[in-house]
Amino acid sequence: MKQLKLKRLLGALAIAGSLAFS
């Protein structure tokens, strides 16, 4: 359960990062 939340957080961070750097 905890790992799934972490993966989701990392995914959101990656999306936010790609949006910020695009």
Image: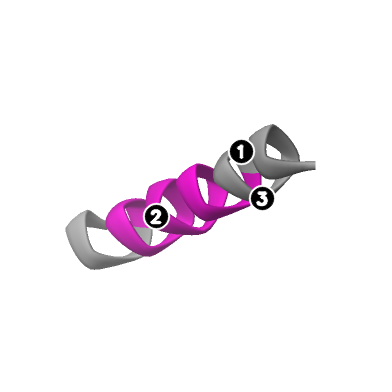
Secondary structure of the residue carrying tag 1 is: helix
Q: Is residue 15 magenta?
A: yes
Question: Could you give the CA–CA distance between mark 1 and mark 2, rounded to whole angstroms?
Answer: 10 Å
User: Which mark sits nearer the N-terminus, 3 or 2?
Assistant: 3
Secondary structure of the residue carrying tag 3 is: helix
**Highlighted range, magenta:** 8-18
The residue tagged 3 is 5
Residue 18 at what x, y percent from top left? Answer: 34, 52
Q: Amino acid at mark 2?
A: Leu
**Disc 2 packing (10 Å; few <14; some 14–19; many ≥20):** few
The residue tagged 2 is 13
3 vs 2, front mark? 3
Question: Could you give the CA–CA distance between mark 1 and mark 3, rounded to whole angstroms?
Answer: 5 Å
User: Which mark sits nearer the N-terminus, 1 or 2?
Assistant: 1
User: Residue drawn 67% across and 42% down?
Assistant: 2
Residues marked 1 and 3 touching at CB (< 8 Å): yes
User: Residue drawn 19% across and 56% down?
Assistant: 21
The residue tagged 1 is 7
**Dominant secondary structure of the residues highlighted in magenta in the image:** helix
Residue 17 at what x, y percent from top left? Answer: 29, 55
User: Residue drawn 41% across and 46% down?
Assistant: 14
Residue 1 or residue 15, whichever sits in front: 1
Q: Amino acid at mark 1?
A: Lys
Quarter of the picture holding the N terminus: top right
Q: Residue furthest right?
A: 1
Residue 7 lies left or right of residue 20; in this view the side is right
Quarter of the picture holding the C terminus: bottom left
Residue 6 or residue 11, whichever sits in front: 6
1 vs 2, front mark? 1
Residue 4 at what x, y percent from top left? Answer: 74, 40
Q: Is residue 22 magenta?
A: no
